[in-house]
Image (tube, helix red, strand yellow):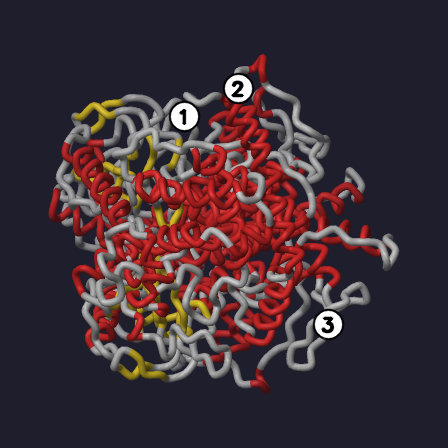
Amino acid sequence: MSFYTQLTALVPTILSYLPHVLLTIILLYVINFYISYINRENPLPGPIPLPIIGNIHRMADAYTFANAMHEQYGDIFEFYIGSRRLIMLNRVDLGENNILRQSIKSNNYFLRDASLSQGWEELGWTNRGVLGNRSITGWLFNKKLLSHCLNSTKYFKESVNGIQQIFSEAEEYWKDLGDSKPLEFTEWIHCLIVDTQIKLITGQTTYSLSSYYNSLLPPHLKKSLSHQSLEDYSKFISHLLAWPPTGLFFYFIPPFIRHYVPGVRHIAEWLKRRLKWLENEVAKIVREKKKTIENMDNDEALEVNLLTMLLTINTERDNNKFKMDNIERPFSEEEIVELLIEVFVAAVDTTTSTLCFLFYCVCKHPEVKSRLVAEIDAALSSQDNNLFYDSLTTLFPYTNAVMKESARMMTVVPLSAQVALEDDEFAGYKWSAGTAVAVNYGVIHRHKAYWKDPEIFRPERFLDENRDELEPKAFMPFGGTVKSCPGKLVAERMVKTLVILLFSKFEVELCEPDKEITSIATIIKQASTPKQLITTMSLYTQLTALVPIIFSHLPHILLTVILLYVTNFYVSYVYRENPLPGPIPLPIIGNLYHMSDMYKFLVAMHKQHGDAFEFYVGNKRIVMLNRADLAENNVLRQSIKSNYFVRVTSASQGWQELGLTEKGLFSNTKLKNWAFNRRFLSHCLTSAKYMKEIFDVAHNRFLEAEEYWKELGDNTPLEFTKWMHCMTVDTKIKIITGEQTYALPTYANSLLPPHLQKPLPQSSIQSYSEFVSHLLYRSSIGRFFYTTPPFFRHYVPGFKQIAARMKAKVAWLNEEVKKIVRNKKQLIESMDDKQELKIDLLSLMLTTNTERDTNRIKASEFEEPLNEDEIVQILIEVFSGGIGTITNALCSTVYYICKHPAVKSRLISEIDATLSADDGILSYDSLTTLFPYANAVMKEAARIFAVVPLLIQIASEDDEVAGYKWRAGTAIGVNIGVIHKHKAHWKDPETFRPERFLDECGDEIKPRTFLPFGGTMRVCPGRVVAEKLMKTFIILLFSKFEVELCEPDKELEYAFTIANTCKELNVYLKARNTEQKV
């Protein structure tokens, strides 16, 4: 096997140690985390973080958490988002000369913390637009040109006109609903702002307001909506509104969880698809608008909307070109798309929440509302009750003060986090580059150091008459860093327009005056959580918006789930059916952590717990029987009517995934199909001509090995396991396919010096060494897919790749065997009917029950030939099932013969006497009928060293076993290795005494106590073939050579995989001086 093959073969063993490995890694990580925490730069007060998640578990509402931490720790503290440390400043003077510096020159805090996240980089937000752009040149160009458009006089006027038109529509709806109808104002304002922003940004019309109004009417009063200019506009708007939750999700959720954890991974992929759809839709709008502009005459007036302005700035149609650092170019399409999305998203939620907070504050304070309404009425009465742009700009000072005071009391964007690009000093500490610094504007806006009576809503503090008590730097409703909002002037005018229009037209009252307004902090602080609307987020979008909040509670959720699972596991364990002694299992992994070698573990458990005990593989309970009489009438019953037809591995999802459970023999769960295949295979294997061919091939392979051993010399230690493996490989492939491979000469060449190495013929099996390695690797694949849970195989990095590679190897092996079958079939079909076929298993299987078969199976249900898929699967099973077991049985037999000189002496005497009576020739007939002591030696070796020591079957129906009643589905195992050495069944069980199998001895061998080839209805169909091969090799070996162990005192080393495998057996072979001609 290649190094990779050997490595992956160890995966189940590694899995058994997984709890210890994981615990060690976790402990090392936790220790390293807290050592780094203790030795961190400039320790500040703050909540102690947890490894991996930091303080996220306390951040269901980030702003509420930050305020609570300020009250507990003061104006400067630290906290952690995941493993990321953030310094929180709650006073202006702590950061006014650096973090809160708004000059772009030498600004060390240009980057937002989110811009450095892998999530935003994955979304492509870090190289375009304004919000997350990491490039200072690109960001500055986008911001200045965007500000140039947003702050133009014509755009200001259009925004005021647009909001008045949409308000007039809302006014009609409200009047239709009547004065006594309570209005859910967050939804009305949200819809009003959506329609206004879409109109101002793209020039197109949407119908959020009318759709929402229609949803409130009874069916017979609903109105048909006008034709929408944005196709499927409700879907478009819902995708726009999902943009902030997408940003939160990709900022908070670690990459590993986004990429590999089911559920979370699907949400991430779904959000990315929605984002891509949105970008494509906006790109379509941009292209359509661009095409419209290009089709217009140069002197024709353009619409006033943001998209038109972005498309025409710094083009031939722009009379007021904008130049920045000698850069004078228009926007690219990609830049426009990102800016349009950011402007819309930033404007809708912030404006909606600002207005809702303002209306709430005004209505909660009657004296403020009275003065506000008086100012509005007085100003409008002087203009014939019309609101004009000029008066909006120059009048209404108290309205301005109310807006500012509302923004101070309820800051919509209360938090900002930036990253230091270079080493810096602030708040009295020196900090390294990369430090994340956050500012809590909400706390600053209510800090007693800057505001008189900060908790009182008093707009008068912003009037000129009270300017002496105002600290300008302490008021930052649009942000205080270099990345403050570029659209603040437009937002102020829109909010002011709506406030004036609303309080001039309506008497506004709260439905529940004593109820506090509810808010939740996502990227902004929203007035309330919106309900499902036609034009707002769908339920699924809202749920994904809550994922970061859920993730903040993840430790508690996981701990609760784990505790519930563990509690349920042990409650089920305590109240399990028929409690038996056995090791206490752990949840999920059971007793796997004990099973670096499953057979040795079960032998130890037998010594500790007795003849009937239980253990767990994962969550699967297995009842293990260690005495023949406990299972002889059920599990070990060989009848086709047995209740224990299905192997425990066949019931696993892993083997089903490999496609092993519906064909062949070993794992086939279809009884009728299995019975047909077994009868068919047994018919082929036990034919007289095939048995004779097996003897001839084995004889020839031994003679070939004999020549290599003689060339190497008597004093050369031979690694017998490898020699037997190679000899078995060449023999098995020859008798199965009729083709020749060269494992034996290849290995011999590797031991010989270059000048003695022999050229090898070309095998008809292409890449036969690779073919053999895939065959041998199959047992490792089966073990991996049985012991490794589906979640690990499908989603956990490393395991997922190993599983995929193993499945590719299975597919490759199937295709290679299929080629061999087709080539053989084509050869047979090209031969004359009278021409004699080669004698090999494949030829027999292809011709049995066909016109070329003279010895058909005499049973109506077995009269059809096998199909190609069944032949392929059976060949693979015969290949892989025979090579390892015969090799290990031969090695263990040779070991025990050499360890017992008396046995070896008697064996050699029998061999010499028998061969000398037959002219020194080993014939097939003598092999079959003679050598009783050789037979006894092989049986005793198989008893002492059970190559396949474990059987585990599933009860198909309810049954009674070992004095207990068991339900269908119970897994019941039999430890053949223990039964073979049980004192209840054998005299001197630990003594190697072949005589016990001779008639002369008189020892009684009880039924079902000697099971070298298995004891259930699935007993090995190739046992006669295996016995013939082994007997041939043993007789030939001890007739020709004096066999000695290189290390006589060393115990036989073995390990259990699916079978007991000899690790190493080194021997000396010295040619005997005999006259044998064998």
Q: Position of residue 74 (x, y in %)?
A: 19, 66
> Does residue 192 appear anywhere in the picture?
yes
> Does residue 81 appear anywhere in the picture?
no
The vertical placement of 216 against 695, above or below, is above
* Label 1 secondary element: loop
Closer to the eye: label 1 or 2 = 1
Horizontal placement of 862 versus 898: left or right?
right
- Measure the C-alpha gap from mark 1 to mark 2: 14 Å
Q: Which residue is mark 3?
A: 329
Closer to the eye: label 1 or 3 = 1
> Is 357 or 672 nearer to us in this picture?
357
Horizontal placement of 330 versus 465: left or right?
right
Amino acid bearing label 3: Arg
Q: Residues within 10 Å of mark 2 (few under 14, many from 20)?
A: few
Q: Residue at x 54, y 51 (%)?
A: 392
- Measure the C-alpha gap from mark 2 to mark 3: 51 Å
Q: Residue at x 64, y 61 (%)?
A: 152
Q: Which residue is mark 1?
A: 182
Q: Which labelled disc corresponds to residue 587?
A: none
Amino acid bearing label 2: Leu
The vertical placement of 942 against 10, above or below, is above
Q: Position of residue 255 (x, y in %)?
A: 44, 59
Q: Which residue is mark 2?
A: 217
